[in-house]
Amino acid sequence: MSESFKLPRTLLILDYLLVATNIVGWVITLMYYHYVYTLHENPLLCHGNLFGLQINCAKVATSPYSYVPLPGGVKVPIALIAVAWFSTKAILCIYYILYDRRLIDAILILSAIGVPLIPYLLYIELVDVHALCTYCTFLQSFIVITLIVAIEIKLYMRKMKLSTTLPVSTIGLSGEKKS
């Protein structure tokens, strides 16, 4: 007797959107970090003016605010922290889809941690550095999008009474249960 199970289409779309935004965020952070800290160049779309505001990623990345001081005088670039953060979230999202739906809570918490930092970082860019970083702005929008999608997934699963202990590893990418 074969039992058939299919994930709701809405949940599949939300799942893929969650993974896509985190992978794209990870790629953007890697690209930005490589250009600014390895090549010492201003990435594409990172120069010019927008309504009288200077667009300059390199200026933002080289400001004293772009580093997190650690004990011993070590300074870690915020961009490197962003690479690690998006990498962790991307891995969690993939693992969430393939193996363990309970990880939605961890993804939700990680996404929620990033949102309160956005106004602070924008303030630093606009008021203290007097320059805007387009890559940072893209990433900040991805942080908000992933939080919204993670909330939607959590609410959808609750509304549809779907268990977070659903044996996802037995479900194919199409949402149909494997025999």
Image (spheres, helix red, strand yellow):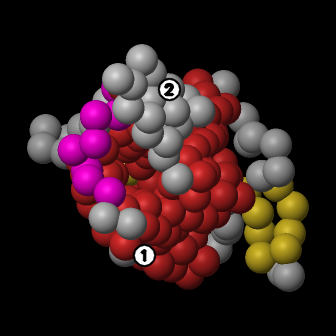
Q: Quadrant of residue 110?
A: bottom left
Residue at (82% x, 43% y) in the render: 44
Comparing 75 with 107, the one in front is 107
Comparing 158 with 36, the one in front is 158
Residue 153 seen in this snapshot:
yes
Report the predominant secondary structure element of the magenta stretch: loop
Image: magenta residue range? 162-169
Q: Which residue is mark 2?
A: 172
Q: Is residue 163 magenta?
A: yes
Q: Which residue is mark 1?
A: 120
Quadrant assignment for the N terminus: top left
- Residue 151 vertical position relative to residue 170 in the rendered view, above or below: below
Inspect the image, locate mark 1, and give the three-letter code of the amino acid beneath it: Tyr
Secondary structure under tag 1 reads helix
Report the Cα–Cα distance between label 2 and label 1: 42 Å
Comparing 78 with 5, the one in front is 5
Residue at (72% x, 35% y) in the render: 41
Inspect the image, locate mark 2, and give the three-letter code of the amino acid beneath it: Gly
